[in-house]
Image: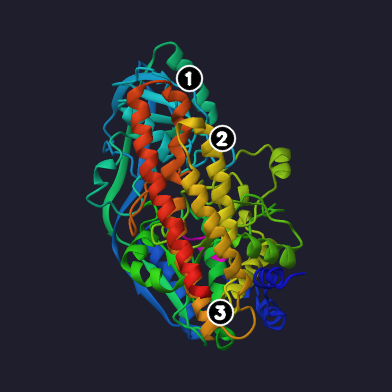
Amino acid sequence: MSEAVSSVDRLSAWSDPALEGEVLEALSLDAPWEVVERFSRIVRLSGTAEERRAIDLLRDRLTAWGIPHTLHEPECFISLPLAASLRIAEPDGPSFRAKTPAMSVSTDDAELVGELVYVSSADGSQAGEVFSTGVALGGRDVAGKIVLTEGFASPGKVVDVMRAGAVGGIFINPGEAIHEGICTTIWGTPDLDNQGDQPTIPVVAVNHPDGQALIAAAARGASVALSTRLDTGWRRIPVLVAEIPGAEVPDEFVLLHGHLDSWHEGVGDNATGDATMLEIARVFWEKRDRLARSLRIAWWSGHSHGRYAGSTWYADQFGVELASGCVAQVNCDSPGCRWVDSYQELTAMSETEPLVDTVIRETTGLTPETERPPRAGDYAFNGVGLTGFYMLSSTMSREVRAAKGLYAVGGCGANIEWHTEGDTLQIADRDNLLRDIRVYAASLLRVLAAPAVPFDFRRTAAEFRQTLAGYQAAAGERFDFAPSVAALDALDAALGRFYAAAPTDGAAGDPAARRFNAAQRRLARILVPVNFSRAEAFRHDPALNVPPLPDLAPAGSYAAAGDDPALLGVLLAHLTRGQNRLVWALMLARETVEAATA
């Protein structure tokens, strides 16, 4: 085995078995299960007195343990759904149970009457589609009408219905329950650039049986009357942040975070996550003199009712600090739920895959299946350029879901009580929660204590290469991605030398380790945005799907463009500019690692 291979292997597989054993042994369910039980009796709508009770409970525990923490109370744009109604607009027409999502237009209980038109669409119940799927209207004229279609009232669907000129939207959820949600594409609090993207129509959701009755009504030309009532406006919300300083390089830190607010009692989404982070805080505080780097733990409000308002505020307020010293952001949502038996569909950026794979195999005996982070969760840090891993935690395997006849949802370990009144204490599982706490603890410890942070950006480069190959196949001879491939080749060679010299022995404070880890952070600042964001640095993309290397994704439009010179000219300009951005990023990344190995 060559020295280069040995160095890389030591980087990805680094651990401190003695320390890790002590940390895992110290983990307990005593405090976290008490939190889960207490939170199961608290409805934590963003910025409400009930949510403040939950924050106070966490603060009391942190104070009792002596853990430093700060409570921020930013004023953010929050929307709380209050009521909705829906009926067939004819004498003695039936009424249907309905819910309105956060950020829908409020009619203030006044009824909107309109012709109902049904447009069939993907219901968004397949893996990966819950947040991103849209509505293909196929040229249907829905202007001035109320559109009925399948799926959750997600931003992608609502924006398509709005743009088509509909005056309202009705969304048929996949099962018996109606799932709460939020329908705006605006990520966090609006700014001058996106304030005009706020939803402009009232939106409601119904369950699947009622949806079938409405489809039949649309077929006979019926009209419907719907109403909504929401409390939408500026509201103070809590953001609680605990700080556990590292002993060697405290300026380097990992951000562990998850949302506090909930729909209804929200046990699986996300009381279990809040409890997980509290137990991590307790044990890592006890072991703080053995941690090289600092651990910052944040509980956000505004996730459910402000499209990640709390985490976005933090990314804005502390953006430069995050860009300077944050090694990685780790999201904690929906761990420890019932019936989970796998780590399939586990979110991880490519550079973290070796770490994630190794930790989960060694900690649980299970083999994870990682996937690209969707534009969801509290991944409010892509514009800053933070490496990230985890979003949802363990989940039911596809086989278990199929056996139980479940459709896909966006949390709760795939329990379909997600975002419903059913997300109560029954959704949590003690054994699974302890297992997931152990996974988070081991993952964090290996990043916090390793001399060289165990990320491998050669995996990122390999992802870029695969993405470019797909775009080149779609473009054919009409566009040449050779400059991107050449820049990627040069970066690959530099990364090979960089990781061959990884300082896997010694201390995190050694000069060689400091240089290596600073270069890793710089690589993230360069490569994460070009792969996950169209927006400028420190700004936020909409809550819509972002494809890999998004500036180059329009290469897939060549087939639809045909021989239209106008479309082809626009595509050429767009891809040329996008390729310039990518090539420049790859050049900067290469220069970064070459300087670190000089």
Q: Is residue 153 at all visible to an observer of this figure?
A: no
Helix or strand or loop: what does disc 1 sit on? helix
37 is within the stretch colored magenta: yes
Mark 3 → mark 1, Cα distance in angstroms: 53 Å
The span picked out in magenta is: 36-42
Report which residue position mark 1 lands on.
Answer: 215
Q: Are marks 3 and 2 in contact (CB under 8 Å)?
A: no
Q: Amino acid at mark 1?
A: Ile
Quarter occupied by residue 33: bottom right
Residue 462, horizontal then vertical, whole percent: 59, 53
Whether residue 517 is situated above or below residue 538 in the rendered picture:
below
For mark 3, what is the residue? 282
Judging by the rendered image, the residue that carries numbered circle 2 is 176
Of the two numbered discs 3 and 2 on the same chain, state the one appearing first in sequence: 2
Q: Which label's residue is closer to the chain start, 2 or 1?
A: 2
The location of residue 378, given as percent across then percent down, is: 45, 57
Q: Quadrant of residue 261?
A: bottom left
Label 3 crowd bin: few (<14), some (14–19), many (20+), radius 10 Å: many
